[in-house]
Image: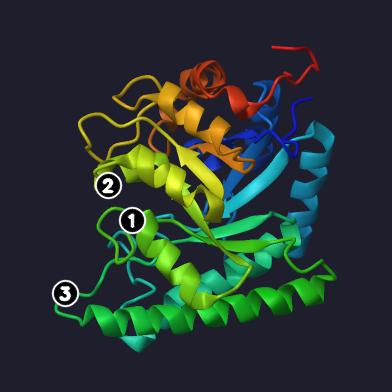
Amino acid sequence: MSRPTAHSPGLAYNANGLRSLSLPAAVRLLADSGYAGIELSLNRQHVDPWSFTDADAAELRAVLDETGLVACSLATGDPLLLSERPFEPALVDADPAARERRMDLLRRAVRIGVRIGVPIVVFSTGRLTPGADPEEALRVLDRSVAELLDVLERELRAAGAAPGSTVLGIEPEPGFLAETNAQVAGIIERAGSDSLWLSQDLGHTVVVEEDALASLRHHLPVTRHLQVEDIAGRVHAHLVPGDGDIDFGAVGRVLHEEEFTGWVSVELYDHDDVHEHSVPDSRRFLLDHLPSLGGLDRAGARR
């Protein structure tokens, strides 16, 4: 069974692209398809932050144990969890009351992530409020990040989990206050915590950065998780790997040369209706182009 080792990242698939399935069914589909991991996602279909209980976490862990699949991340970026305006309110909203709604969601996510046992809980900054002062927004963001790190420490202690067994990750997103890898790296540096990391999204890097490969390489030392999808014409629309312009052979060389050992997770949130094809096609293409994903298939045979 393929598992990430000290020298090999694992391949996962984000469950936000499998919303027509129950979460146990999504776990079993990915396990049967040869994936090593599943990236969980806050949404009302799978991990509802307002109703997900410790019993639900135990049930999920049982299915993961049964299949051997690893829950490698919990993503908190569902656009409509808090309002009909995508991704609003933001973590950097100028209205403190609105901002608190996002903080409440993220506190819940941290608790759920720790109870499930995921290695990383990922969030984004959200958009700057029109007319707001960017410098003040960054100060607000830094305070919010510090609070979430405190929440993480408390939840790990309450769960009897080792420090660092779950960390936080910030994902750059086009159009958000932090939309580049360098901007997130700056937040990490200011926080000064071993529990805060970068969660890169390859497609986002291609959309917003002029030299995506250079940015990918430069920021791998602070990266714990890498989401992948293809992009065509630098338009922010997630495509099945191989259907766009990204040179995945070059990406694979970067990951191999830099000895990246984090998880690589396919994110195709708008491909649920064709997941019968996107799940196996993505895996097949990425195993061909990212050689550092490892040398064994789920049956234990050399690929």
| Type of the residue with mark 1 | Thr
| Type of the residue with mark 3 | Pro
Label 1, on which residue?
180
Q: Check the picture and name the quadrant holding the N terminus.
A: top right
Q: Is residue 203 visible?
A: no
Q: Tell which of 152 and 279 is nearer to you.
A: 152
Secondary structure at badge 1 equals loop
Q: Residue at x 44, y 70 (%)?
A: 187
Q: Residue at x 27, y 47 (%)?
A: 209
Label 3, on which residue?
130
| Type of the residue with mark 2 | Glu
Secondary structure at badge 3 equals loop
Q: CA distance from mark 3 to mark 1?
A: 19 Å
Label 2, on which residue?
209
**Residue farthest along the left direction in this orientation:** 131
Count of numbered tags? 3
Q: Residue at x 79, y 76 (%)?
A: 157
